[in-house]
Image (cartoon, grey):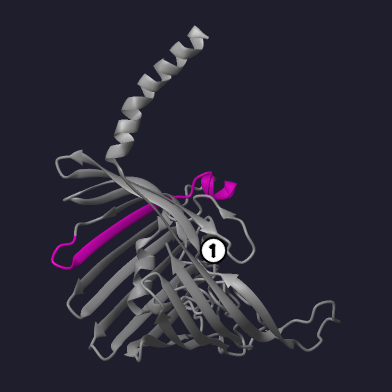
Amino acid sequence: MNKKLVAVAVAGLLAAPLAAQAQTANVTLYGRLNLTLEAVNGQQTQVEAPVGSAPVNRTVYRVSSNSSRLGVKGSESLGGGLSAIFQIESSINGDSGGGTLAGRDTFVGLQGTWGTFKIGNYLAPYDDIHPIFGNVPTLLTSVLSTAALWAQGSQSKNNGGFDARLGNSIRYDSPNMKGFVGSLQVAAMDQSNSTIAQQQRHAYVLSTGAFYRNGPFQGGIAYEMNEKVRCLECNDWAFSAAANWNFGVVKIGGVYERLDYDVTGGSLTRNFWGISATAPIGPGEMYAFYGDAGDGSGPKGTSVGQVNQGDSTGAAQWEITYTYALSKRTLAYTGFVQTRNDKNAAYNFNINPYQVVNGANANGFVVGLVHFF
């Protein structure tokens, strides 16, 4: 019994300094649940039907969880204006249960007057273009996400996407200098987030951006390069520029993007542009967006993800939504979105996609409820 008491006392003495250190850190538990009732439809290939049979227009009613999360974050002052920072953010499947531990932005880093440095798994500077023109009132997610065409948002890195969370990353963000912030991120495609082939060819992603916000104006440019990510000889890149101006009665935004993929025989390219408007209407906010992805241009018959070479391979996305804050932490919204494909294109939604055949439209009507905690 005496030996057990001594062991407990020693453990308590050893734990005391650690507990004291923990008490000096600023730690916050946070999260959000974002669930939607959805009716989505579009022409799909018939299941278990003869080859060549006509597609059918299916309407699916579903509940979806949209970027719901649970996280813990904090900081600790190290003296001299330097702080240690950390975040562990997990995804939550609020519609069906489950989730992924640390599957969202998770990192450890340092922060000071010189800027912020962090290591981990998180979104890249290229993604920071999205809020400038996108549907911020609905949190840039659900089938209403305005990245259905921009950045090939529904596609993975291995399939030509440029709006993906990057593991094995290091990132630097400059301090805010009279409204200007610069960002640089490098992600090594090593064993934990790549195929064996990518490991052997030393694939990596480089993403950089410059952003300015002052008064009613906000703007940014970003560039991202996928070196040997999709294939051994592939050097894919994307460039995007966006801006908005808040006139008070309405905020007008716009975006331009060019995608460039290495393919057999040359480069496959695609241009995209979009325009948005956000306005206070009654007790809430109305948002409207129209974006157009042009035809793919390059060697005949080439394709990457949903970008195809040839005539009538483009698509348009339009949507209109209304968002109402029930309280400081509870939000309700509704909206309609359509991804309108040309006859040789089959783009769908970014979040919770609904696959359609070439030339068909993906339509979605949404009613959503969000709670922040």
Q: Is 194 covered by the magenta stretch?
A: yes
Image side of residue 317 versus residue 52, left or right: left
Residue 206: in sight, yes or no? yes
Quadrant of the rendered image containing residue 126: bottom left
| Quadrant containing the C terminus in the rendered view | bottom left
Residue 51 image-quadrant placement: bottom right
In the rendering, at what x and y percent does residue 185 appear?
A: 34, 55
The residue that disc 1 covers is 156
Residue drawn where x is 58% and y is 50% of the image:
195
Q: Residues within 10 Å of mark 1 (few under 14, many from 20)?
A: some
User: How many numbered marks, from 0 up?
Assistant: 1
**Residue 119 shows in this picture:** no
* 178 relative to 269, above or below: above
Residue sitting nearer the eye, 16 or 268: 16
Q: Residue furthest top?
A: 2
What residue range appears in magenta?
176-199
For this view, does 308 lie left or right of residue 123?
right
Q: Residue at x 47, y 81 (%)?
A: 333
The image position of residue 37, as x and y in percent, is 59, 78
Dividing the picture into quadrants, the one containing residue 59 is bottom right
Compared with 83, 159 (above or below) is below
Disc 1 element? loop
Taking the magenta stretch, the answer to whether it contains residue 237 is: no
Type of the residue with mark 1: Ser
Looking at the image, which is closer to me, 347 or 335?
A: 335
Q: Position of residue 36 (x, y in %)?
A: 56, 75
Q: Say above or below: 287 vs 214.
A: below
Q: Identify the residue shown where x is 57% and y is 74%.
A: 303
